[in-house]
Image (spheres, helix red, strand yellow):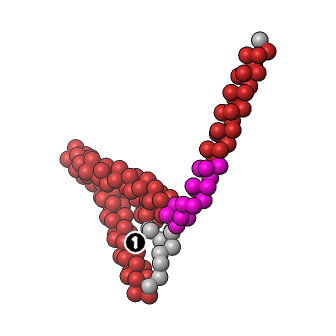
Amino acid sequence: SLSETAAVAARMDGVFTEVRAGAADARRSFERFPRAELEDARVAMRNLASLLGQLDFYGSIPARCASLKNQLKTGGAAALVPTYKRAMELELWRAALQRHVAAATERARHREAVGQQRASREYGLDELAALSGT
């Protein structure tokens, strides 16, 4: 009926007004929130995602090593070359990671010495994720 439709429309108008008021309140609250803290939270979320990927990578290393040992035991001399290549890849990755950590540490010490604030991209986990292949 027409009166029921009008009642529903009036209720929807009321709900719409409340939603608009709530959205305006949320926007005002968001605008009062310090931007630096939002940036830090965004960087922290990105770093956490990168760290979780690295943990998966590191967690798979024991299984990879066990697989390489098993290949050596079962394949004998024929398995030696691919096993050695994989071991060298892991060693090169480890060395690259150590160089990256040393360089990041040196940059952080330099920034502290001159009193600079860190830039948001200087947390280093993006480069670490690239080194891990995640």
Quadrant position of residue 31: bottom right
Q: Where does label 1 land, which residue?
A: 100
Question: Element under label 1?
Answer: helix
Is 63 in front, or is 68?
63
Report whether residue 98 is seen.
Answer: yes
Q: Residue at x 40, y 52 (%)?
A: 53
Is 121 in front, or is 83?
121
Image quarter (top left, top right, bottom left or bottom right) of the N terminus: top right
**Does residue 27 belong to the magenta stretch?**
yes
Image quarter (top left, top right, bottom left or bottom right) of the C terminus: bottom left
Residue 120 coordinates in the image, percent (x, y): 51, 69
Quadrant position of residue 28: bottom right
Q: Residue at x 64, y 39 (%)?
A: 19
Above or below residue 128? Residue 12 is: above
Residue 87 coordinates in the image, percent (x, y): 30, 59
For the residue marked with disc 1, what is the amino acid?
A: His
Q: Badge 1: how crowded within 10 Å, few (<14), some, or many (20+)? A: some
Residue 38 coordinates in the image, percent (x, y): 52, 61
Q: Residue furthest top?
A: 1
Residue 127 coordinates in the image, percent (x, y): 46, 65
Q: In this view, does 19 lie to the left or right of 57?
A: right
**Magenta extent:** 24-38
Report whether residue 133 is seen.
Answer: no
Q: Main secondary structure of the magenta part?
A: helix
Q: Is residue 15 left or right of residue 92?
A: right
Q: Which residue is drawn at 41% across and 56% down?
A: 48
Q: How many circles with numbers are drawn on the protein? A: 1
**Does residue 86 belong to the magenta stretch?**
no
Q: Which residue is drawn at 34% across and 53% down?
A: 55
Q: In this view, does 26 lie to the left or right of 131?
A: right
